[in-house]
Image (cartoon, helix red, strand yellow):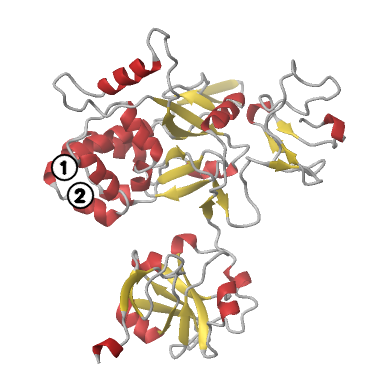
Amino acid sequence: MDNLAPKMYMTRRHLGCLEPLLGQQVWVLSLRPPRDDDKPLYLSTEVGTLADIWGPLWKSCRRSRPEDIYELRIGNGCILPWVPDSRVIQDGLLGEDEIFCHWVSTRKLPANIELIQKGLPRQSFTLADQLFIGATGNECHELKPNLTCTRSNNDIKRHMSDIHGLHQLNTARQTRYKDAQTVQVQGGGLGLTVGNTLTYKRREGHTWKDALVERWRDPKLRNPVPLEHYTGLMISSCTKNAKRVRLLDVLATDTMKIFLKGISFSWEEGLESRYYRALKGPKSFRRLWDDARARANIGDAISICLDVLAETGVDEQTGELRALWAIKANEAESDGSQSPASERAESESGRMSVDGTPALNWEPTEEYTLSIFRKEHIWTRFLRDTPDFMALAVVEDICLEPNQSYGRRCATWRFDESGREIRRRVPNPSNANPNERAIIDRKAIPESQDSRIGKPKTMLGPHGHQTRISVLDGRARCP
């Protein structure tokens, strides 16, 4: 009889929009074995059942109609009536008595909710309704990685150098600033003149960033809780789009990993991998911080990272946003005195110390400060350091694009009106056909983000802007 009983599989599955609320996958009983192409699950439940299992939750309603609930607040977000996605419509998953809903984080709550819900038959629900939760949330403004981008670090370095946006670490251009201000007031009466001169000087304040960096320099004052705040900024090296992240996420970026390798930071045995695994979330990092034996070494690593990140942020004089960018250095040129095999053997032996133990974890790196100009990215003016606000910025080797139809896109490929690809490189003038002309030298002016004639203007930093005037014929195209 046991052979006739159905076999049950217990596996972990992804939920749709509710997985960020739980912070993990859920266990599911199924009659079929799991597959790699399993899609995220939806959740059909009543309000009371949801509150008993994953509560508490609070309802939001208007005083004129208290029985109509327009949102349910649960966790760090809320549940809203939403537009059914294509998968629900095609597969007919939504029941007649169910209301399609979406859980969205408060930080990602879209400003156009009323516009999104405009075509819904019901824009509210009651406590007796059956909720069907699991929207994809494509209407929310979000940056997502573009995995098809092929832009190299050398291209980015060349472009940023051309617009004077790439500098060596801990360097700055010479600028002028106001040292003092004199206000003179004069008044006269009956031939008597009285003069008064007032001189004001600005007393520098103490920002949150400065206080945080100073506290982490003292091992007795280190507190890991501020690292959980969303005071970090991760900037795409390709599109220059940026998003707010936790400071823990900033410490886990490739830029900070490469920076620590470049300065040969000495990790205790097995602690480096534990440290980077713990940076995935506040709970895991707090568990690692509870280990008193590892706390000193981890604290020293974080203190060094905060010291170099203290130079990032909005410059008070120029208004530019400065961010740290660390990349692996190109392979050094051979001196020609040894064969390639001998050089490789010497390189491998150089990784061991005199007593045969592994040497310090060092790799050749390049460290830069990348400047984001306000005239091109007006959002940078909101990131000034204050006693209540700070921004520690890093550049990450990732292409971030918005999921909406507008916003800055990847600049890897360009197409003209006929759909033909415009190649990024121009021919060498010495090898070019004399009957053909190079359209533009991309070392002087980068490519336009739009192929429409006359507009829009593409800002080129200190070089001004670029506007497309006309289309050249086929003979003038680059090969």
Image quarter (top left, top right, bottom left or bottom right) of the C terminus: top right
Q: Position of residue 189 (x, y in %)?
A: 60, 26
User: Height in image: 1 above or below 291?
Assistant: below
Looking at the image, which is closer to me, 135 or 348?
Answer: 348
**Residue 138 - label:** none
User: Height in image: 3 above or below 277?
Assistant: below
Q: Going 36% across and 33% down the picture, which residue do you hit?
A: 258
- Cβ atoms at labels 1 and 2 below 8 Å apart: yes
Looking at the image, which is closer to me, 438 or 120?
Answer: 438
Image quarter (top left, top right, bottom left or bottom right) of the N terminus: bottom left
Q: Earlier in the sequence, mark 1 or mark 2?
A: 2
Question: Label 2 neighbourhood size at 10 Å, few (<14), some (14-19), many (20+)?
Answer: many
Looking at the image, which is closer to me, 440 or 241?
Answer: 440
Is residue 76 at all visible to an observer of this figure?
Answer: no
- Dot 2 falls on a residue whose secondary structure is helix
Callout 1 amino acid: Ala
Q: Position of residue 125 (x, y in %)?
A: 50, 85
Q: Is residue 375 toward the left or the right of residue 313 in the image?
A: right
Q: Going 19% across and 21% down the picture, which residue do you hit?
A: 353
Q: Going 40% across and 36% down the picture, which residue do you hit?
A: 255
- Dot 1 falls on a residue whose secondary structure is helix
Q: Which residue is mark 1?
A: 294
User: Height in image: 393 above or below 126?
Assistant: above
In the rendered image, which quarter is residue 351 located in? top left
User: Height in image: 437 above or below 232?
Assistant: above
Q: Which residue is mark 2?
A: 288
Q: Position of residue 293 (x, y in %)?
A: 12, 42
Is residue 474 at all visible to an observer of this figure?
Answer: yes
Number of marks in picture: 2
Q: Going 84% across and 19% down the picture, which residue do you hit?
A: 434
